[in-house]
Amino acid sequence: MRPRGDGALNCCGLCTCPGAATDEIMHQDLVPLCAADIQEQLRKRFAYLSGGRGQDGSPVITFPDYPTFSEVPDKEFQNVMTYLTSIPSLQDAGIGFILVIDRRQDKWTSVKASVLRIAASFPANLQLVLVLRPTGFFQRTLSDIAFRFHRDDFKMKVPVIMLSSVPELHSYIDKSQLTEDLGGTLDYCHSRWLCHRTAIESFALMVKQTAQMLQSFGTELAETELPNDVPSTSLVLSAHTEKKDKAKEDLRLVLQEGQGILESLQDPPAESTAQGVNQDQLDSQATVQRLLAQLHETEAAFDEFWAKHQQKLQQCLRLRHFEQGFREVKTALDTVSQKIATFTDVGNSLAHVEHLLKDLASFEEKSSVAVERARALALEGEGLIDNKHYAVDSIRPKCEELRHLCDQFSSEVSRRRGLLSKALELHNLLETSMKWCDEGIYLLASQPVDKCQSQDGAEAALQEIEKFLETGAEHKIQELSEIYKEYESILNPHLMEHVQKVFQKQESMQEMFHRRQASLKKLAAKQMRPVQPVAPRPEVLTKSSCPSPGGWRGPENSGSEGSTLRRGPYRRAKSEASESRQGRGSSMGDEEENLAILRRHVMNELLDTERAYVEELLCVLEGYAAEMDNPLMAHLISTGLHSKKGVLFGNMEEIYHFHNRIFLRELENCIDCPELVGRCFLERMEDFQIYEKYCQNKPRSESLWRQCSDCPFFQECQRKLDHKLSLDSYLLKPVQRITKYQLLLKEMLKYSRNCEGAEDLQEALSSILGILKAVNDSMHLIAITGYDGNLGDLGKLLMQGSFSVWTDHKKGHTKVKELARFKPMQRHLFLHEKAVLFCKKREESGEGYEKAPSYSYKQSLNMAAVGITENVKGDAKKFEIWYNSREEVYIIQAPTPEIKAAWVSEIRKVLTSQLQACREASQHRALEHSHSLPLPTPASTSPSRGNTRNVKNLEERKTAPLNLEGYVSASLSKPHEKGKGWSKTSQSLEAPEDDGGWSSAEEPINSSDAEEDGSVGPKKLVPGKYTVVMDEEKGDPNTLNVRSGDVVEVVEEGAEGLW
């Protein structure tokens, strides 16, 4: 499509054209030709538009001398004419064209044909046709004659003038409007003209295509539906921005092209500058300028449209961000609102309320992120509304809802804080009252009864009590109804019951004070009667304090006075004796009252520390353990802590639930009867086994803590909890608590000796100590290494401890025996129901639990084949464990005689239970067979003489038939050589170890001689029946072979100790 004068291109609907543009566009639509389409036809130059103008401004079309004009196809001729006549503006074309036909070198026949052809095919208005006829004489004459005779053939709407010469042409058209070949001065280059026309029309086409592209892009933008989510909106905005940038780049290139064409038109060759610029050149410049202006208008319109579209997209994106943030914030606010609704507890103690307030503050701090974000989002929404957002009706309700939720949450937090503050105030009052009561009870308990018997002491005690009671106005609960009224909003049944108990305690304490006051007032008000200064007779002083009724008579005139003197002291003594008895009764009552006060004090301490313990456990579980599962804290947790919560905290949660749900409540039920608290422990003794599991895990927990103690997670949790101590101090709480119970039970038992629950307290104390022992034993048991079997198969661990051990092996090498006499081995023994284990203790490097010892397994003895000798002469700390009929003998030296006694007692219990089982299994055979035991030859001392005393004691008590040290199966064995006795010199099963053992210089040698020396000799066996507990078969004819379970009767023990 070619440009046509002013407004040769209608760009697009994004801009409007000047008034005349519509007609031009219509004209262009009728003439769709352009230079590029007929470029080859135009190059033939059989007609051209030089740009010259007639006197009235008519465009001049020149038909130069073209010999083959007649051969130009009609179609080409018609296209060229149509194109040339379409170039001038409508205004100039409306005046009419002037045709200059140069046929000076042609023949008349050709002239006639050319003129007729042009006249017949010219598509526009003609004003004048000027023909330069042939210059030859003959042809000129012929043309004049022919023109006259054929004038009718040339009849046109305009006149046709035959010109003989160029000067005649100049009379019609000025020389400046004619090209040089027509004698004019107009600069015209056909190739340059053709190049300019092609460029202008190409630029016009580019402008049109750009306008269409922008129109299509604008339509696409206008028809785009706005997405409903942030990613899609961002994607659309990005895609549209990218397309806009590309369109703007194309527009820039078109503008650059047009500017280059305009500069080319405005910078003609130097030779044409002096001659001036023709009208066609000016029209071309104007056309390009108008195209550029139109393109700028199109760009401005598009920029305006894009700005609106971009603003809408950006508003849509902000709206989607706002809506997404609204959904997230509303979810967070709903969550915190639900969580705050669970804060219904008002606490059961002062510490609990303080912890709840800290929890509320911590929760408020955590929730403040969501609340602040909600408020910021509401402000952002209001900003969108202020900026004339298109979705105001959608944004405003959401902003109002966010503000409502924030205000509602803040109001609920304030309400909860107010309730907890009320609870804190009430618990402070209760704690103050309790403290006042305790101080009063201590005051009563601390007043010495003996000093209160005097008037001064009673008055001092009374003043002390009255002074203390004056402090009650600010410490005690005044009116229960006022408390109920003031704290109605927080009083739940549990708290109301607590208030009532405190008030009852306060009333009871005041009643005790009133009773004490009454007693003290009586003592303070008691006046001593005056003694009359009557001197007694001298002989009266020598009489007995209890004279006979007639032992002394005064003068007759003083008989009544003497009687008065006799009765006065008697009555006074009787009164004082009566008062003394009352004082002793009062003293006993006061003592019992003091014990009750002390029991309540111990109970209060037990309850207070139990509540604090539960609170501390909860604090650790919520502040540390639960936070390990919090996604917001995950970035602070080090790699070594991942999936290690069970290792770090063990079964602390199980311990917390037991104490919080069960044990604490049962203890609270005993607050009125503290002496019965032992039953709580006895009933829950099995539940306390959970501490064994916790303590067994403690070394692993301690090791993990030492590896990760500098983790930022722990520091952040400690900061939030406002703890002064780190987590490891709280992980030690369960261990400290289980050891605290036995101290409290001891205190309670001390003040409850004559009370109903004393036996339960004693049993509970023993059970707690047993649990502590089991926990301690299990801590050592898990440190055993090198044992191939299952330690659980050995039965319950009864005892464990470190000892010095000497061994004696009958089959051992003599040198090893002699060497072992001087060097003991240090061994840690573990006594199980079915075996005793010998281990070597090895101290580990490190700190804390990492320094805990480990135990390398060395050997074990089956208890079914073990016997013991309780006393080893020379050392009260030693005893023997022997194995397989004394093939192996182990001399054990305990650290103290008490430890030795405990071990011997425990081993005795194990062996006695085995013996009882053995007896029951062979009872039917034992009842049928009884054998007499002949006396052995008096060649040696009886091997059982060292054990005779205990066997006798056992027989006399009529208990089990055989004592541990009277384990007499060995006493029926072959007599030993005199001087050897039972304890042979010990011999090790392995070479002596240089691990800090005892030297021979430091440890006396235990031989049979040492055993038989001493002032206390062995006692003889009492004749009677005894049961054999171990087989003994020897080939010696002097020895009686017996089997386990046989019953033997000892008839007599000779002087030599022989049976």
Image (cartoon, rainbow, N blue to C red):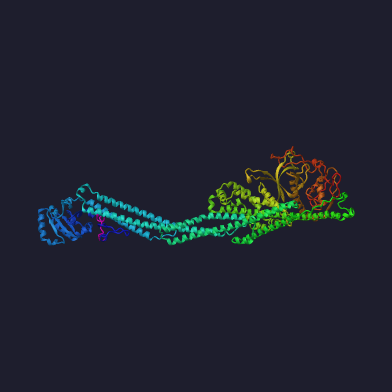
* Residue extending furthest toward the front: 557
Query: Is 602 in front, or is 222?
Result: 602
Q: Is residue 201 left or right of residue 994?
A: left
Q: Is residue 221 magenta?
A: no
Instruction: Please identify the quarter of the rendering in which residue 974 is found.
Output: top right
Considering the whole magenta stretch, tell me its main secondary structure: loop
Query: How many numbered callouts?
Result: 0
Q: Compared to 821, does 294 lie above or below?
A: below
* Residue extending furthest toward the top: 1001
The span picked out in magenta is 27-39
User: Does any portion of residue 78 appear in the rendered image?
Assistant: no
Q: Is residue 932 left or right of residue 801?
A: right
Q: Is residue 661 left or right of residue 559?
A: left
| Rendered location of residue 572, percent (x, y) | 81, 54
Q: Compared to 81, does 981 lie above or below?
A: above
* Residue extending furthest toward the right: 550
| Rendered location of residue 424, percent (x, y) | 60, 56
| Rendered location of residue 997, percent (x, y) | 71, 40
User: Does any portion of residue 153 appear in the rendered image?
Assistant: yes
| Rendered location of residue 626, percent (x, y) | 57, 54
Query: Is 393 in front, or is 648?
Result: 393
Q: Is residue 33 magenta?
A: yes
Q: Quadrant of the N terminus?
A: bottom left
